[in-house]
Amino acid sequence: MISGMVMIFVALWFYQTARKANVNNVLIWVAIGAVGFFVLQLLLVNFNIYILESVRASEGGAGYEALQGADRKNEGDFLGFAGILKSLYLEVSPSVVGFIIIAVARLKFLTKESYTVQNLFSGVSEIFSGIKNSFKAP
């Protein structure tokens, strides 16, 4: 759910940037941004699952095997405050890392500006102000 909203945001961000950069194929760049974010999201979520399963499987024994496909989230390390932090990390980190990688790709291939934090996230505040202004009555 979070990554779906971020993907829509990335598509809007690429659209706005492509329009400002006066690129002929704006929709191609929007598709590249959205599909690129989706592929990164898929890879990073699978990487998190691999890490989670390797840690849980390293415990081994009958306790791990007894679950037999049951919901492992409520078992073991995901209880208490530390478990909440682990769950938040596993849920949010693919979206954040994917967004940063897409921002670098946008800067390198679309805007071709220098690598600074300001240039990396340029246009983000304009998107939010545009969304806010779209709710105002004409």
Image (cartoon, rainbow, N blue to C red):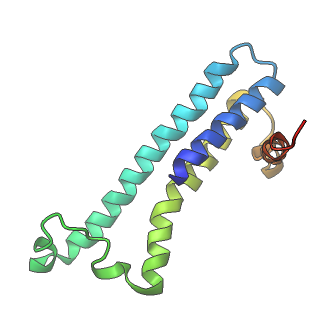
Residue 66 image offset from top left, x and y in percent: 10, 74
| 123 shown above or below 82 | above
Residue 45 image offset from top left, x and y in percent: 41, 53
Q: Residue at x 50, y 67 (%)?
A: 89
Q: Which residue is drawn at 70% across and 20% down?
A: 26
Total marks placed:
0
Given the current orientation, which residue lies at the most extreme right position?
A: 138
Residue 8 image offset from top left, x and y in percent: 61, 40
Q: In this view, does 71 lie to the left or right of 11?
A: left
Q: In this view, does 57 lie to the left or right of 131?
A: left
Given the current orientation, which residue lies at the most extreme top position?
A: 24
Q: Where on the picture, by quarter, is residue 105?
A: top right
Q: Quadrant of the C terminus?
A: top right
Q: Which residue is drawn at 78% across and 46% down?
A: 124
Q: Where on the picture, by quarter, is residue 103?
A: top right
Is residue 72 or residue 62 the one in the foreground?
72
Given the current orientation, which residue lies at the most extreme bottom position?
A: 80
| 47 shown above or below 52 | above
| 23 shown above or below 73 | above
Q: Which residue is drawn at 71% across and 29% down?
A: 15
| 29 shown above or below 1 | above
Residue 136 image offset from top left, x and y in percent: 86, 43
